[in-house]
Image (tube, rainbow, N blue to C red):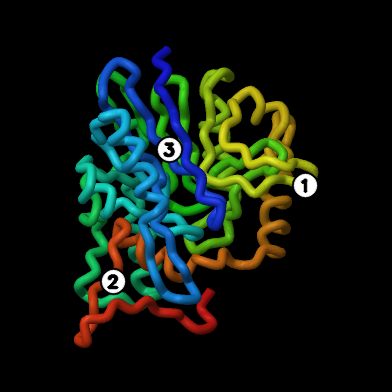
Amino acid sequence: MQRPIVTHFFDEPTNTFSYVVQDPDSRACAIIDSVLDFDYAAGRTDVQSADNIIAFIREYDLDVVWILETHVHADHLSAAPYLHEQLGGKTGIGANIVKVQEIFGKAFNAGSEFARDGSQFDALFEEGDTFSVGQLQGYVLHTPGHTPACLTYVVGDAAFVGDTLFMPDYGTARCDFPGGDARTLYHSIQKVLALPEQTRLFLCHDYKAPGRDTFQHETSVAEQRSENVHVHEGISEDEFVKMRTERDATLGMPKLIIPSVQVNMRAGELPPAEENGTVYLKVPINFF
């Protein structure tokens, strides 16, 4: 089985891991789940996190062929447009982005200039679609439940699962966002856990479960099957749905969900400037 070189980048303010996935036999690479820094209080963006990835790419003279999103993130803004401008590469996300765009296009009352057909991305992936990173062959699992458009990218012995799973001691993704569903997530997780047990799983987030002092980004199918506190072997679908539904009812909203979704449903682009030349993000009152 092919074994890509995987380098992680951690943005602690949003607890987000981004990845550069390299073909060991060429210069080709892909970037997965990048971060655009955002100071919510000041309303200011910054590209320091993205520049760290760019510096790495340039240091090793890599060729970016894909800039991929596992889903429309609700906890950080994507830096995909900036990375595309600096490094090239095609952008990709799940084809069900159109469902997310429809939901949140209405929620934020986006105007007619906001296309709801996924055309902001270069590729809209369906279950089983394939892609290449040099000599590496990747394919896509559609793993909804957290959002309708969630994907897992499988590249050789590595799978990038987005928010579907966390470290085994922390569990699984919430399912209470618009379009989410706990029963759907259970079935998506079973797809991931059906991969070979030695498959490396790379996570989009870590929050340090109680009793653990370090952030962690990598686990395996075998570890998840035996140790995941929410969905290890022996946990039934109904048990999982009951746990997930009750747990979700206690959770607050991510602090960056309002800016994140408005930007990420546009493939990382900010909304168009208004007549005075300034870009604004909306805050829907009593909606979420």
* Mark 3: few/some/many CA within 10 Å (<14, 14-19, 20+): many
Q: Secondary structure at mark 1?
A: loop
Percent of width and height locating residue 81 = 26, 54
Percent of width and height locating residue 161 = 49, 38
* Mark 2: few/some/many CA within 10 Å (<14, 14-19, 20+): some
* Viewer-side residue, 164 vs 22: 22
- Rendered position, 91 above or below 58: below
Mark sitting on residue 271: 2
Specify which label sits upstream in the sequence, 1 or 2. Answer: 1
Mark sitting on residue 19: 3
Residue 136 is at least partly visible in this image: yes
* Residue furthest out toward the bottom: 276
- Rendered position, 38 above or below 22: below
State left or right for residue 187 relative to residue 64.
right
- Residue appearing at x 71%, y 27% in the figure: 226
Specify which label sits upstream in the sequence, 2 or 3. Answer: 3
Q: Amino acid at mark 1?
A: Pro
Mark sitting on residue 210: 1
Marks 1 and 3: CB-CB under 8 Å? no
Query: Label 1, label 2: how many angstroms apart (C-alpha)?
Result: 39 Å
Q: Nearer the viewer, mark 2 or mark 3?
A: 3
Query: In which quarter of the view is residue 218 placed?
Result: top right
